[in-house]
Amino acid sequence: MLIILLTVTLPVQAVMLDDIRHMSDIGAPALALKLLQRNQPPAESGIAAWMEWERLRIQLATRLRRWQEIDQRLAILPPESDDGFRLWAGTARGRALLEQGKPEQALVAARQSLWVISGQDGSATMPLRRLIVRAYLNQGKLADAETAMIRFRQDYPDIDISGLQAEVLLRAGRYEEAARLFSERKGDKQRALEFLAQLEAGQKQPAALGKRIMWVVRKTRLKADESMRLWQLVARSAEQAELYVRRINALQKAMALSTTRKSGSDAGLDALFPIRGADLWDAYLDYGQYIGNRKQLLTGQDEQWAAAAGNATTKKPLRAAALWAVLAQNALDPDNQLRAHGKFAELLMKQKQGAVVLRYLYLNPDSPQHASSLPAAVNHQLADKALAWGNLALASRLMGQLTTAPEGKESLDWYMRRARILLLGGQIDQGVQALHELLDRYQSIPRQSLDRLMQVLFDVQALERHQDAIALFKRLPIPAGDLKLQREVAYWTAESYASQKDYASAAAMFLQSATLPGPKTMDPWGQTARYHAADNMAKAGLIDDARYIYKQLLKVTKDESRRTVIRNRMQQLLLTASREKKGS
């Protein structure tokens, strides 16, 4: 009885809103957002209800990281919205802009929200003021960030944001002040910032601090971004303590974590903990030089360095990798450099996250080395990894450097896959060239493989490269007895001609597709192809030919709706011909 009474007395919208919250709470935020979008009342029907729905809408979109949607949604608010909602919306939009890597726009949005609203208490404007500090940091405007932070501290003395304040100090290189701040205050501390302050201020011995940080990482449940920064700090402390192996391992762990974390609004914070391939390369070089000095190896003794690396490969692969890195950097013979790069990369690929590490070392725009230094076998593996990461552009770039299939792979399938990756990755000219090279290589292709190859040619058409598609369709090695495939190829070739507005050629290919079994063929495929042939004849101005094909279709078409369409087309052609006669 109580449930019935509540259902009767509560507004329908409130019940629906509770249902949507429940959907979100049980782990279906996308469904909750879809239901909310479908049922949210318009602002005109009541601004109070609309604002309640809108808050939940933005909260759900935030949870789903739909930053662009939030930005667009909150850019223009109903004029009836109250100031409190406008401040909240300004903060939400500012965060969405920061998450998209747009600190300048976030700063403008925050300032606009503050300028147009007056009479609000400090607690209402505090989130926007804090967002302004973050926007300045993300822009790298340290002086402005520090000024904004000082004003924030003056206006909100009871709000402890020592973490953000410490970040400002650390970015400015004022490590002792940051360390003192952490020792004096308690609040929204961040472990990575506190450890960084202690390390750079010289308050802790680097080796001991690194050991302490590793304990925290292993014993505490942390988010990926925090773990990444802590491992980077382990590497930095290990560099100061000359703990070579710890430094390398920590950097590689940080790199592995960097691929799993979600991009966020902390570009300013990330500047304090950069993950760079050059740092890892230097770490390998430092370790390799250390080992070489102990073994009294000299630069230029390529064979001795290679022998030392080879001897360490089985039992101490990290040591071997470091020696190969030095040889790759310093070998006198370029061939020895390439061989060393290959050995180094092969050792890394045996590690769990080796592909990620090689991406930082060889594949990123700021990588210290170049992918051309890697052997084909490694690039094949990296191309597969790039596809698994969903990075088509990288996979395409790697495939562009490969010309032969990897050992043990079916060559024809690999060449088709290579062409498709090049096309989808934006290297269209290379993809088309790869298809021509495939057809040069294989004069005969099994039917099942031809079907797959046709799918790649459809990609060429989808990219609006119809002249290339026509040339490739004409080169397909179709068996003489396979009329079905011949008809299909003629049909799709006609589609490309039509897309180029070469209507006469399109009509000819459609007719070829229709009549390959015989001139009187009127199966469903043939009827469809004839209809398209007539349509293209009409576009080419061949009115009589088009009417003749339509008349043939009328004789065999049973479906009344299709007959109506054909009659209408014929009537349109009559009108067209009549107008042309009058005009002449």
Image (cartoon, rainbow, N blue to C red):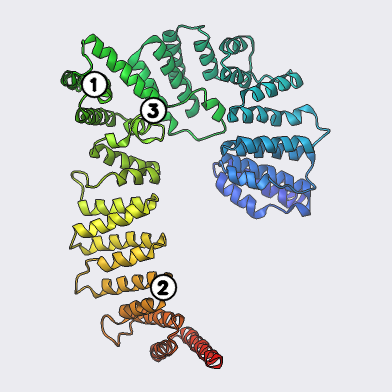
Residue located 73% across and 47% down the image: 77
Closer to the observer: label 2 or label 1?
2
Figure quadrant of residue 529: bottom left
Residue located 30% across and 66% down the image: 471
Q: Which of marks 1 and 3 is nearer the N terminus?
A: 3
Q: Which amino acid does label 2 sit on?
A: Ala
| Disc 2 crowd, CA 10 A, few/some/many (<14, 14-19, 20+) | many
Per the image, the residue denoted by label 3 is: 277
Give SS at disc 1. Answer: helix
Figure quadrant of residue 91: top right
Q: Is residue 6 visible?
A: no
Per the image, the residue denoted by label 1 is: 320
Q: Which of marks 2 and 1 is nearer the N terminus?
A: 1
Closer to the observer: label 1 or label 3?
3
Residue 362: x percent and y percent?
Answer: 34, 33
Q: What residue type is labelled 1?
A: Ala
Marks 3 and 2, how far apart in space?
50 Å
Residue 498 has which mark?
2
Q: Which of 528 and 13 is in front in this view?
A: 528
